[in-house]
Image (cartoon, coloured by chain):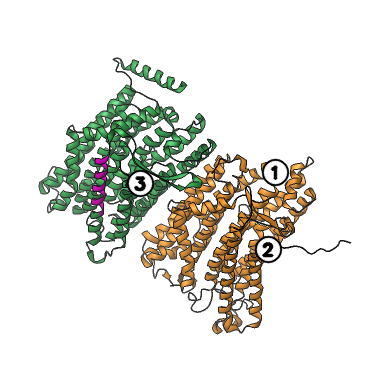
Amino acid sequence: MNDFPWLTLLIAVPLVGGAVTALLPSKGGSELPKQVAVGTAALTFVLSVVVAFQYDAGDGMQFIELHDWIPAFGAHYALGVDGIGLTLVLLTTLLVPVVVLASWNDADDTSPSAYFGWMLALEGLALAVFMAQDVFLFYFVFEATLIPAYFLIGSFGHVDRAQRSKAAVKFLLYMLAGGLIMLASVVGLYAVSAQAGNPSYLIGDLAGIEMDKETGRWLFLGFFIAFAIKAPLFPVHTWLPDTTAAATPGTSVLLICVLDKIGTYGMLRFCLGIFPEASKWATPVVVVLAIISIVYGALIAIGQDDMLRLIGLTSLSHFGFIVLGIFVMNSQGLTGSTFYMFNHGLATAVMFLVAGYLIRRRGSTLISDHGGVEKVAPVLAGLFLVGGLGTLGLPGLSPFVSEFLVLVGGFAHHWVAGAFAVTGIVLAAIYVLWMYQKLMTGPTNPAVSGMKDLNVREIAAVAPLVAAMLLFGFYPKPVLDIINPAVEATMIHVGVSDDDPVVAPVDADQTHDDQATEEDHK
Amino acid sequence: MIEFSKPTLEYDLLWPLLLVFGVACAGVLVEAFLPRARRYLVQTVLALAGTAAALGGVIYVGVNLDDHGPARGEIVAMGALAVDGPTVFLWGLLLVITLAGILLFAERRLEGGVSAFAGQAAALPGTDAEREASTKGLDHTEVFPLMMFAVGGMMLFPASNDLLTLFVGLEVLSLPLYLLSGLARRRRLLSQEAALKYFLLGAFSSGFVIYGIALVYGYAGTMDFGGINEAIANSTGSRTMLLIGIGMISVGLLFKVGAVPFQSWTPDVYQGAPTQVTAFMAAATKVAAFGAMMRLFYVAFGSERWSWAPMLWVIAVLSMVVGAVLAIAQSDIKRMLAYSSITHTGFIITGLIGARSASDLAKGELSSTQAVLFYLVTYGLMTVGAFAIVTLVRDAGGEATHLSRWTGLGKQSPLVAGVFALFLLGFAGIPLTAGFVGKWAVFASAMSAGAWPVVVIAVLTSALAAFFYIRVIVLMYFYEPIGDGPAVTLPSFMTATAIGLGAVATVVLGVVPGPVLDLAAHAGEFIR
């Protein structure tokens, strides 16, 4: 492997591009900022693909860059990607150009240069989050993502100012509260590592520390609460629907499909990676919370009349799946979750963006204001259906593969967990198909009768996502090949292994428990 | 009869301090002998040049300090002062803040050709004499020597190595500040009320200090910090007098930094004083007082840590919580910043209770002194910048400090609103700003010393505090201006420089804090 700082470049390109975009004049409907933004985002994507092709699936952490940053804190500028990180990096770089293209005219009445500038800044920081190999650096960029996110929610959107700023403040306060609780744990890690003799924040160094049980559990809690708010997980999810309802669909995609992945990614990388003992200790509670999220999120999604709220709430259900997959701690669950993070990004982005197209045409987010759209805008309706089918896990589209893996993992953990999780799929079918039926079928609502179908730009924006869903739906092997070695490494570190297949589910449970206790005694 | 012996002074180490006092005295002579029209320019140049020269001197002294193991530097002036690493660091910081302060004091464009200070302080508000002074365009250029005296006191305060010098430093820094607080050109009654309140409460707290000093002297038989430490370490008798003494001296010091329950003056004085004075005072007083507090607690009462640490735990928690809760209810930007400064006092005390002996630290681990020094740098520079911005947002009646007047500032003046938002994010401790690194440092210091309950409360308070900082950003950016809206007056390069200094420091120390942290580490321990 060469020494070229690919990952730094990957962070720097969107940040610099974002700064340039923000400084360009945006008055008078100038297209220049948008062109610069989409060019930067596309360049970033190309770079990430170059990185992906150089990536060697069997070789663990790669493209490592390690420099001292703040020696007094033991903080390093340490970047690197493994299979899990790379998957999320690719998701991010794929989604941003799509979002920029799809949101082309969303900020025309305010300031396109600020809108797309913040988006690119968010991309750069999010990429840094997924590549950080130092807890301090991670925390630093983790919190820094809030600044662009906050301004994206508060400054742009279709609803009135007061509601928007309220949503932005609510979002920020939730995130800050979680982040600050995590700060206590981050600081605690410093104390622990200093006590061990060498203050260092490198994940590698921290994972090697023998932490006393009590301390580990407290620190774990700090991290977990922050990630649960971010993800979001029941009962700290209430910021989610308010935010998606107030933000532009483009912003929502970046928040839900990219930023929220930081929560689940953090659980996988930090909770499991640094606090394996505490993670196993917390598993029962976390699994229960995840199942509540799956079922509860789906149930309240069914009752929504606001499209953007509804799509936001479906994500609550899906994040429940992801968290479930992570904390059942077997290879199917972990692989499924990682892949799920990727697929959820694709499907939800399609739903959000196409819903955004529709809302822009009709001027209303309410499902009841629509009806019979498929007759006037068949392409729009068709793409929406594809996104919806992806969300509900139709075989042939990539989300099915990951959902299936998570469910297998859930059943392997305990059949009750699996059984409850399965209901999430049924409920997903209800909310997606019902929404589709009310929006698109039936007699054409007079208000939508003159609606134009999608133009080339709009189709071109979501086409890559649909293509990716189809491709990985039929042939998930390339992604799974990247993810699997990383998951195996995580499992070895946590000290869990898959159970041998057994016939009676009760026995399987028994074996697993025994094994877990055995591991504890070691 | 005691024979008089001439004291020896180490002029090579002390000359920056003496230079500052010299400049202050020269400023008085300028007032006495120069015609009125020429005083402004001469005073400004004198103060700036003197401060810059002193800053150069401090750097020179710092580079050449002797190294004695964990501490650097030496005890000078017959044991009255200690010029060691932390002293030099604090001196440097104070002088940088002073440079920014002088620039703010000298600003004349905002008030249309006169400074922000009263034309004739002796004239009663609302009288003919006042009107006359203002039509003549009179100005009090005495503010520069007053400020330099205060700076001298502030430099003396953290360097003092015995209780009497400590008290002298405290008074020398306080008296000019009382006076400066009462000199506002506009809203003079408010300003005078602030000055009186500050003076009365300050004098009261000084009384506590002097009584505390007497008690500690009675216990230890010496004023010298090193001697007190020895007396504590060797004594086996009753410590009642010592404990009461420590408590009473603490009252005075905690009053100066505005810690709860001695905070009640802070909002009134910060609001009433001319904003330029508030900017300087809020930043510099904290630096000086925390420097003195650290030396007193670490050096003199170091062996008594188990007595004062719990007290500071309580004070830290109270300051953070009370400051943050009350700040939420404020509708005046200066009062809000005042309450926020109380919260920050709590954070700094959190760093202070992380004190541990050098042998307990791992190699390369952050020390408490280092954390507090760094926090003072970030807080000081951000505070100067934030208050300097407050001077820019004006309407017909002077500064528009009511929060409602700041509505929609992001539309009117994106640059000013943007920089102010940066400072607010810095105060809130969001990464990419210096505030985050500072906060991390003091929390890590406290956590490593086992004060985790304080740290947990501190992070929760930070979340609470974030609310009122964010609220101002919301006002500035997400709302339309009401009526005429606020007007941002374009300042001269002087105020702009002060703001720029704060903004650059906020960003640079947020991203690459390493050099300053290393400098703070290099300052080493307090010399005993």
Separation of residues labelled 1 and 2 (CA atoms) = 31 Å
Q: Give the drawing colour for chain A.
A: green
Q: Nearer the viewer, mark 3 or mark 2?
A: 3
Please, what secondary structure does the residue beneath circle 3 have?
helix
Chain letter for the residue marked with disc 3 in the picture: A
Residue B304 is labelled as 1
Answer with left or right where residue A289 lies relative to residue B75: left
Answer with left or right where residue A444 lies relative to residue A136: left
Please, what secondary structure does the residue beneath circle 2 have?
helix
Quadrant housing the N terminus of chain A = top left
- Residue B93 figure quarter: bottom right
Q: Residue furthest left?
A: A375
Chain drawn in orange: B
In the rendered image, the vertical position of residue A503 relative to residue A112, given as above or below: above
Residue contact between numbered discs 3 and 2, judged by CB atoms under 8 Å: no
> Mark 1 is on which residue type?
Glu
Q: Where residue A123 sits: x, y (%)?
A: 31, 49
Separation of residues labelled 3 and 2 (CA atoms) = 54 Å
Residue B200 is labelled as 2
Is residue B504 in the magenta section? no
Is residue A429 visible in this depiction of the protein? no
Give the magenta part as a residue range. A40-54
Answer with left or right where residue B105 lies relative to residue B13: left
Q: Where residue B150 sits: x, y (%)?
A: 63, 66
Is residue B331 visible in this depiction of the protein? yes
> Mark 3 is on which residue type?
Ala
Chain letter for the residue marked with disc 1 in the picture: B
